[in-house]
Image (cartoon, grey):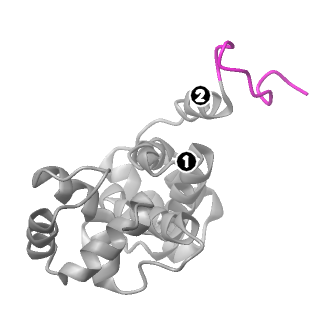
Amino acid sequence: MSDKRKILTKAGSRTLVDEYASLIKQYASLEPAREQQLARRSQEQRDGAATDALVTSHLRLAAKVARRYGRYDLPMADLIGEANLGLVIAASHFEPGRGARFSTYALWWIKASIHDYILRSRSLVKIGTTAAQRKLFFGLRRAMKKFGGDRTGLTPEVAEAVAHELVVPVRDVIEMSRRLTGIFP
């Protein structure tokens, strides 16, 4: 097995994710004109090389976004893989004639892929099936912090403030908090 494939221990210096991060640095960011040119070739001529160049030039963006979701205690390699999947989906749907940068468009697809993965992986019990539940799932921690709640419990006052902030019923806030913290009365 090559050195790049080995997963080194914490005492070692690098993991596969670290290796991946150093490998994707070789792909330069594109100038807006070059990006538009590649996107047009990809869309109009179904040029695979143009699509590859467009995607590989944005791998660092996908990895950066994936790192923001590390707090969900899921393997970073899986989060990066899902982010890359979102990047590929974005490349297949991107319309260069609308004037937007590919990175701006791809960001939505990257986050959507990661959110979908987190919701599928977070619990055996299906959560986040409605838009309000997804908003609650991804916003609960931030809102609890804002209103003084913590991971050990949820006071009725904080639950009510969070529910008002996220525009969801108080009982949904309490239920989601219980699911995420594992604390049941």
- Placement of the C terminus among the 4 image quadrants: bottom left
Q: Is residue 25 above or below residue 146?
A: above
Closer to us: 178 or 2: 178
**32 w.r.t. 168: above or below:** above
In the displayed image of the protein, which residue is found farthest to the right? Answer: 1
- Residue 144: x and y in percent read 19, 57
Q: Specify the quadrant of the image occupied by residue 64.
A: top left
According to the image, label 1 marks what residue?
A: 56
- Based on the displayed image, in which of its 4 quarters is residue 97 positioned? bottom left
Assign the N terminus to one quadrant of the image: top right
Q: Disc 1 and disc 2: Cα gap in Å?
A: 17 Å
Q: Residue at x 40, y 58 (%)?
A: 181
Q: In the rendered view, does 27 fall on the left or right side of 3?
A: left
Query: Bounds of the magenta span?
Result: 1-14
Residue at x-position 80% and y-position 27%: 6
In the structure shown, which secondary structural element does the residue marked by tag 1 occupy?
A: helix
Q: Please say whether residue 124 is visible from this viewpoint.
A: yes
Please give the name of the residue rendered at 25% of the width and 81% of the height, measured from the top-left corner. 171
Residue closest to the eye, 104 or 112: 112
Q: Which residue is mark 2?
A: 18
Looking at the image, residue 76 sits to the left or right of residue 36; the answer is right
Disc 1 versus disc 2: nearer the observer = 2
SS assignment at label 2: helix
From the top left corner, tell me how far across and down residue 16 is, in percent.
Answer: 68, 32
Q: Quick check: is 3 in the magenta stretch?
A: yes
User: Looking at this view, is 106 or 120 the one in front?
Assistant: 120
